[in-house]
Amino acid sequence: MIQVMRAGSAFLQELASGCVRNLSGHYQSQIVDQGGLEALLTLLLSSESKLQEHSVVAIRNISTKSAHDSLMVERGILAPLVALLRSTNESVQEHAAGAIRNLSANAENKRRIVLEGGLAPLIGLIRTNQQAVQEQACAAIRNLAVNAENSARVIEEGGIPPLVQLLRSPSKKIQENACLALRNITGNGPNELKVVMEGGLPPLIALLSIDDRDLQEHAAAVLRNISVNTENDQMIVQEGALEPLIRLLSSPEQRVQEQVAGCLRNLSVSNVNKQRMAALGGIPPLIALLSSPHEEIQAQVAMVLQNLSKNVDNRYRMVEEGCLPPLIALLWSFNEDVQEHAAGTLANLSVNADNAEKIVEEGGMPLLIGLLRSPNERVQEQAAVAIRNLSVEPANEIKIMEEGGIPPLLALLRYNSESFQRQGTITLRNLSVHDENKFKIVQEGGIPLLVSLLKSPDKLIQQHSCGILRNLSVHADNCTRVIQAGGLLPLIALMRSPDPIVQEEALVTLRNISANPGGRQDVVREGGLSPLVVLLRSPLKNLQEQAAATIRNLSADDVIKVKFIEEGGLAPLIQLMSVNEAMTREHVVAALANLTMDTANDSSIVAAGALPLLVSLLKDQSIRTQEHAAICLRNLSCNPEIKVKIVQKGGLSALVQLLHSPDLVVREHCTVALRNLSSADENRAQIVKDGGLPPLVELLSCEEERVVVEAAVALQNLSMLSGNEAAIVQAGAIQGLVPLLTSEDPLVQDAASGALANLSSFSDHDARIVQAGALPALAKLVLSPSLVISEHSSALLRNLTAYNAEIKMRAFESGCLPPAVQLLRSREKVVLQNAVAIIRNLSFHPEVKVRLVEDGAIASLVGLLNNADAEVQEHAAAAIRNIMAEN
């Protein structure tokens, strides 16, 4: 028959080709092996319609065997087949298209068919009204469009409109092939918009509701490809695709579920669509598919939920619908895509504090921590974000550490990835608030890593690395470790950062380091003082505050005080005394308080205009600021010239008013300042006039002896001015001073006895002093080993016994005579003068005379007649005369 086809008459060729046509359904290989291809190829070129038809059907049947594809093309079959696509015989067109369809399954043939010009006539055939022809031509185009270049040619040749039209064909086969062709075209390059512009969305969406799973799959796949282009998203939704897509999530077919989930993944990128999907009930079926046995579906659904969970409202809905258990279960998956998107969804959900708590309750934390060690960096990153969010809750800080989270978090810092370093530093910053975590971070070698990241070009990494070091540096040991790790230079460099947040973090870290006495010199040695002075002039209030706080710490060092002045820091520091920020004012005044501890700085501080500002700050609302201002004035008031200026600037009245402060420390420093100021006569009257006496007297009963001393000394100074004594007594000073004579503190004894000695110079007050119980105390105090106390107490006793006979007798009865006799042997002039005067005062009474004789006072008195001091001689002679006189 093959031979007849080659050489027979037209009639015989027709019969032979018809037989071969019939046999070609089963004996394709035999026909090829017997040389039938060449004979059939010849007949394809015949002008006889029947011969063309028989031969093309045979060729189509032979082409169903893929083993013959290449051979047939090599023998030149394509050109005549392409030519027959333009035949007027619809049967010939159908079978020619069918043969090309079969041959186009071969990758190389796809290219050659297009090169032979087969695409244009195929597109022409899908425009015909013959379904059989349309079906074969459409299937051929479907195969050809697998190739990206061919997809572009289909579009160039105008293939999209007829393919879209075929989506409405009454034939499901044609619909399926058209769908597959569009699926291939939209999957190859940016061709999606063309399908949309040609009206492809409505028929594609309609196919989703046809009860044919193949059509549902392919339509969903085309929509999935189209939705890759975000410009198409809203049009897809507006055409009503969401409802059937969500419905198909519950399809029993895995392949349908997969394409639908992929499409929804793309659509869910849009914020508007996130809300619509949830409103249309998309969340429950998506959550159900998390438990699918197919990993690809799990991955796609997890991606959809990851997108949806970026919407705040959806986070609540998803958790309420029970998404957490299946999501957490997927963290166990061996599929890294599944792990990535499950962790990513949990990361989004964990932004909400309630959700974060539930994730921990459901056991998500240890799995997420485990994924920090995943070999897949995308998985690591999503897990890191989730852990970062969980770490915001204080309750989770220790749990993360206990679950072993700190080592892998520190490992993220070693990656050459800014994203990893960001997540790691943010999380560790949250964790480092807790003391146990501070210890663990340091123990795991975190400080050198963090110091190295201070040089990162990424501002966020710098910021959070600084933030962690800031938290760690609240412990003195860690300050030392930061210094040893070379942290000072980069921290000081970051004070010059253009990012004010980074500047602040670096500043606070240095502030903490400078709070440790051992670190202050290191900060200055590495050049930290100059940028700190510059930051005092910063327009940013928070930077001013932190710079002032750091200088406050540094200025506690005597050497640094000098360097700070040399760096020109005094002027900008004093300028900050008038800012509105309370903490800045406090730090500035505290720094000045440190500087005033060195008297060499006093003149510079006053010359820079600090005095009026310090006086005004005594009225500051902050008690601590008041305290430091009072310290400054206390220190400055030691300078005689500055004392005058303090008073001129209104400091005296302000200090007196502050004696009423509820804070004892403030009152103490004001008292010391007033004590210093009260050493000048011109200030003594003013202190009394301004109401300073009552609060000073009140401080005499303070439990802090150092405060008592200062108050007593101030009263002692005030009592030196004639005219003040009445007001001092009226203020109740005697009742406050006398009990202090029995204090065990020599300083208190000294101040109290000195003040009372001054007051006793006026006899009007003697009785009150005695009534307050001074005499028994003086009987002991006059023998104090302290010369000053002995002088003051003996002077007081001398004054008390000078005039009042009753007081004289009470002094004798209180045991004051024996110590006075004992003091007759003193070598101290003032003490001796007072002692012999006391003997003279007491010697008028017969009982005293007897006692003086018994105590051997006569010999001492006689001996004093030869004393070089005339006053001593006078009192000794008078005492002897009194003793010898008859009563």
Image (cartoon, grey):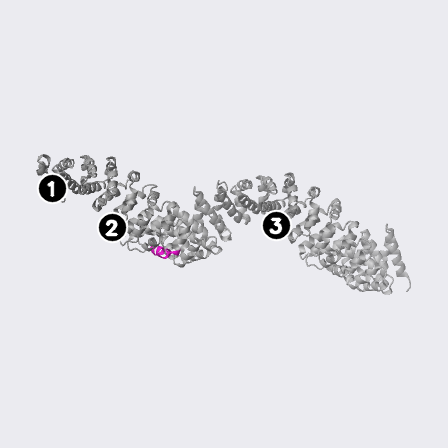
Q: Which of the labelled discs sits on residue 18, or is there none?
A: 1
Magenta residues, as a range?
A: 279-291
Question: 259 and 385: which one is in front?
Answer: 259
When the figure is inspected, residue 78 is found, relative to residue 174, above or below; the finding is above
Give the side of residue 198 with respect to residue 716, left or right. Answer: left
Using a 10 Å C-alpha cutoff, classify the residue at mark 1 as few (fewer than 14 neighbours), some (14 to 19) or many (20 or more). many
Amino acid type, label 1: Gly
Q: Position of residue 69 (x, y in %)?
A: 19, 39
Amino acid type, label 3: Met
Q: CA distance from mark 1 to mark 2?
A: 32 Å
Q: Earlier in the sequence, mark 3 or mark 2?
A: 2
Q: Which of the labelled discs sits on residue 516, or is there none?
A: none
- On whether residue 717 falls in the magenta region, the answer is no
Quarter occupied by the N terminus: top left
Q: Position of residue 22 (x, y in %)?
A: 12, 44
Q: CA distance from mark 1 to mark 3?
A: 105 Å
Where is mark 3, residue-wise?
A: 583
Q: Earlier in the sequence, mark 1 or mark 3?
A: 1
- On whether residue 284 falls in the magenta region, the answer is yes
Toward the right, the furthest residue is 886
Asked which quadrant contains residue 879, the reply is: bottom right
Asked which quadrant contains residue 773, the reply is: bottom right
Of helix, strand and loop, which mostly describes the magenta segment? Answer: helix
Q: Secondary structure at mark 3?
A: helix
The residue at 45%/44% (across/down) is 421
Using a 10 Å C-alpha cutoff, classify the residue at mark 3 as few (fewer than 14 neighbours), some (14 to 19) or many (20 or more). some
Amino acid type, label 2: Pro
